[in-house]
Image (cartoon, rainbow, N blue to C red):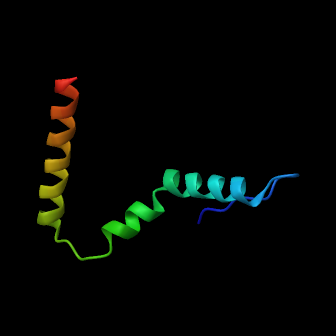
Amino acid sequence: MSFVTLREGEEGESLLKRFQTSMQRSGILRELRNRRYFKSKGEQARLDKQRSLRRLRRRRNR
């Protein structure tokens, strides 16, 4: 669980921004999106392979 504490003299906007960045770094929202629908192990492996190939192509094109 991700949480932030209010700093002295901090406004709500900056507190919210810090919370959002901590949520992004922890990967909670990404995991929730991935678990929204069931994926078999084979399907997940295929998606992971596609993602890694895409990443390699991007790095090679730079």
Residue 29 found in image quarter: bottom left
Q: From this viewpoint, which residue is outermost toward the bottom? A: 37
Q: Position of residue 39 (x, y in %)?
A: 20, 71
28 relative position to 36: left or right:
right
The quarter of the image holding the C terminus is top left
56 relative position to 31: left or right:
left
Vertical placement of 17 versus 58: above or below?
below
Q: Residue at x 87, y 52 (%)?
A: 9
Residue 57 found in image quarter: top left
Q: Residue at x 16, y 71 (%)?
A: 40
The quarter of the image holding the N terminus is bottom right
Q: Residue at x 81, y 53 (%)?
A: 10
Q: Residue at x 79, y 58 (%)?
A: 6
Q: Position of residue 56 (x, y in %)?
A: 18, 34
Q: Position of residue 51 (x, y in %)?
A: 19, 48
What is the number of callouts on the image? 0
Vertical placement of 36 versus 43: above or below?
below
Vertical placement of 1 versus 17: above or below?
below
Q: Position of residue 20 (x, y in %)?
A: 57, 57
- Nearer-the-camera pick, 14 or 5: 14
- Nearer-the-camera pick, 45 or 29: 29
38 relative position to 49: left or right:
right
Residue 5 found in image quarter: bottom right
Q: From this viewpoint, which residue is outermost toward the top? A: 62
